[in-house]
Image (tube, grey):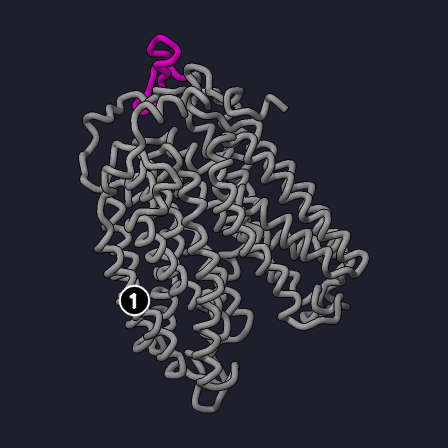
């Protein structure tokens, strides 16, 4: 499999760098399916005859494996290059669906845990970080925009997978609107067929990325871009730090804390989006002005905000700087949460606008993180450092729902609450963002003692 | 084809090599990711419309 080696994927002279973003997007759009699992959750609950929690574990395993595999395999991804790591990601992600399908067809839930959760989760983690450092090397003049494009794909993947999966489930079940009605839930067999289809289609699309990804030749630079004339900032290093050293620095853990706090706060809205909008507009008679279908529209709006924020805010960070954009995410985010908490119930437009902007900051914080790491630690092992940073996502995925559900459980039962019941949750999110804002102000350039010596870098380059 | 600003050059190639635009591959690649993304956004926006009805 020599064709997968980094040395075989070096771009020839005159290679058009705009071929790289579609290759990266091909991977991220596929693995972004992980955000669209709610489409068949009820069908799996019915098929296995188990609780929401038992089925929810499938997706929890996948997200935990995403963080773990990105952290553990990050150095391997950096060493092996994007083509080999994207191929491994495509194989794991595709195989995860196929093993999951076998579990559904044979009614063996452990196989679904193993397939989609464990195997697919490894594909998620490796796929997420595979193209990121390559993109930053192709776009040294606009690293935020480059990573924003790819990581936008992870947000966009759910927008595609959700309606596509619904349509396929209806096709496999022979759905008839006159007979099946609005309460129709897909059969387990059709979910199995969906997993088979997704496994094959996603593998094929990701292989487009594998075949078309290229790394720039050593010393390559975009025409018209002179690094010596680029805007100089103390927060943008020209040195390089290894992944092993990066995690010894205070700045890494401050960025980790910032991402963890921002993501935890974003999950506060994402987790509760549908019941939250219904509760905020509940009248004195106990009935909400927002029905389930309209609430689904709100969830869709948040998905678009999440996706758009990844590209827009990350691109903006190239202009105003990484530290400033994170201060916007955290400072303005806290302010908007306050407006949402105290005035959100007064206007649907205000509620939706605040929520969408907050979620766009949530997406933006993911997409800007790799470029921030490049600024602080250089490009030497930025993919591996990014992998380690993603453990903040896994931790937030556990902490966010625990905080939100714990505080809401103390307020009452779902479907009976009002806007004021959300005050404790939303003000807690404000507190988290304020702590994150303070942490962000403390991020400083990395001490020179952590920089890699030139001879180490030269031998590493020779080796790769 | 004249070079455009921000086109890539490869100093490792020894000369200031102009970019091969690879138009066909470029269009295919962006369509491959753009069409499904547009489908997802349009489908979602049609649901969002119900919010303000």
Q: Is residue A21 left or right of residue A343?
A: right
Q: Is residue A244 above or below residue A349?
A: above
Q: Is residue A282 above or below residue A51?
A: below
Q: Is residue A357 left or right of residue A186?
A: left
Query: Element under label 1?
Result: helix
Residue furthest out toward the bottom: A285
Magenta extent: B1-19
Is the residue marked by circle 1 packed among few (<14), some (14-19), or many (20+) residues within 10 Å?
A: some
For residue B5: magenta? yes
For residue A374: magenta? no
**Residue A454 is drawn in which quadrant?**
top left
**Residue A50 is drawn in which quadrant?**
bottom right
Please tell me whether the stretch drawn in magenta is mainly helix, strand or loop.
Answer: loop
Identify the residue under disc 1. A336
Q: Quadrant of the N terminus of chain A?
A: top right
Q: Which residue is at a point 37% across and 83% down the rendered structure image?
A: A420
Q: How far across and down, in percent of the image, does residue B39 sit? A: 55, 47
Chain containing the residue with disc 1? A
Q: Is residue A82 above or below residue A156?
A: above
Q: How far across and down, in percent of the image, does residue A377 sit? A: 31, 39
Q: Is residue A283 above or below residue B15?
A: below
Q: How far across and down, in percent of the image, does residue A194 sit? A: 71, 52
Q: Which residue is at a point 39% across and 11% down the rendered structure image?
A: B13
């Amino acid at each position: 499999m020599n064709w997968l080696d980094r040395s075989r994927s070096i771009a020839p002279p005159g290679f058009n760098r705009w071929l790289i973003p579609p290759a990266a997007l091909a991977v991220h759009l596929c693995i972004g399916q992980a955000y669209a699992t709610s489409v068949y959750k009820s069908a799996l609950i019915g098929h296995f005859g188990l609780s929401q929690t038992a089925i929810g574990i499938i997706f929890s395993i996948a997200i935990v494996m995403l963080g773990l595999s990105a952290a553990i395999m990050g150095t391997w991804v950096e060493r092996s290059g994007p083509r080999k790591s994207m191929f491994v990601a495509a194989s794991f992600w595709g195989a995860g669906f196929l093993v999951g399908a076998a579990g559904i067809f044979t009614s063996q839930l452990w196989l679904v845990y193993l397939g989609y959760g464990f195997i697919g989760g490894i594909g998620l983690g490796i796929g997420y970080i595979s193209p990121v450092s390559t993109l930053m090397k192709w776009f040294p003049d606009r690293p935020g925009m480059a990573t924003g494009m790819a990581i936008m794909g992870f947000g966009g993947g759910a927008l595609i997978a959700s309606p596509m999966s619904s349509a396929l489930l209806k096709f496999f079940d022979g759905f008839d609107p006159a007979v099946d009605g609005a309460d129709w839930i897909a059969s387990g067999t059709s979910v199995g067929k969906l997993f088979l289809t997704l496994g094959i289609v996603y593998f094929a699309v990701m292989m487009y990325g594998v075949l078309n990804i290229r790394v720039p030749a050593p010393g390559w630079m975009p025409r018209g871009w002179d690094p010596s004339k680029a805007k100089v900032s103390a927060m943008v290093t020209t040195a390089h730090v290894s992944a092993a050293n990066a995690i010894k620095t205070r700045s890494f853990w401050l960025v980790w804390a910032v991402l963890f706090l921002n993501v935890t706060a974003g999950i506060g809205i994402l987790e509760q989006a549908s019941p939250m909008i219904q509760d905020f507009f509940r009248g004195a008679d106990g009935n909400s002005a927002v029905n389930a279908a309209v609430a689904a529209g709100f969830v869709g709006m948040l998905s678009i905000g999440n996706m758009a924020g990844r590209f827009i805010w990350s691109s903006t960070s190239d202009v105003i700087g990484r530290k400033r954009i994170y201060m916007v995410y955290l400072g303005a985010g806290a302010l908007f949460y306050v407006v949402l908490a105290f005035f959100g119930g007064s206007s649907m437009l205000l509620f939706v606008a605040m929520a969408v902007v907050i979620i766009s900051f949530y997406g933006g914080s993911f997409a800007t993180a790799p470029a921030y790491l490049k600024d602080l630690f250089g490009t030497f092992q930025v993919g591996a450092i990014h992998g380690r940073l993603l453990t903040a996502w896994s931790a937030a995925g556990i902490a966010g729902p625990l905080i939100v559900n714990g505080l809401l459980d103390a307020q009452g039962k779902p479907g009976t609450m009002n806007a004021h019941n959300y005050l404790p949750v939303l003000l807690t999110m404000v507190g988290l963002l304020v702590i994150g804002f303070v942490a962000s102000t403390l991020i400083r350039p990395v001490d020179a003692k952590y920089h890699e010596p030139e001879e180490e870098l030269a031998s590493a380059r020779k080796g790769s | 084809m004249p070079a455009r600003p921000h086109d890539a050059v490869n100093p490792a190639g020894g000369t200031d090599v102009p970019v091969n635009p690879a138009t066909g591959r470029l269009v295919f690649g962006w369509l491959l990711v753009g069409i499904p993304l547009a489908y997802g956004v349009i489908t979602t926006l049609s649901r969002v419309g119900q919010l303000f009805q």
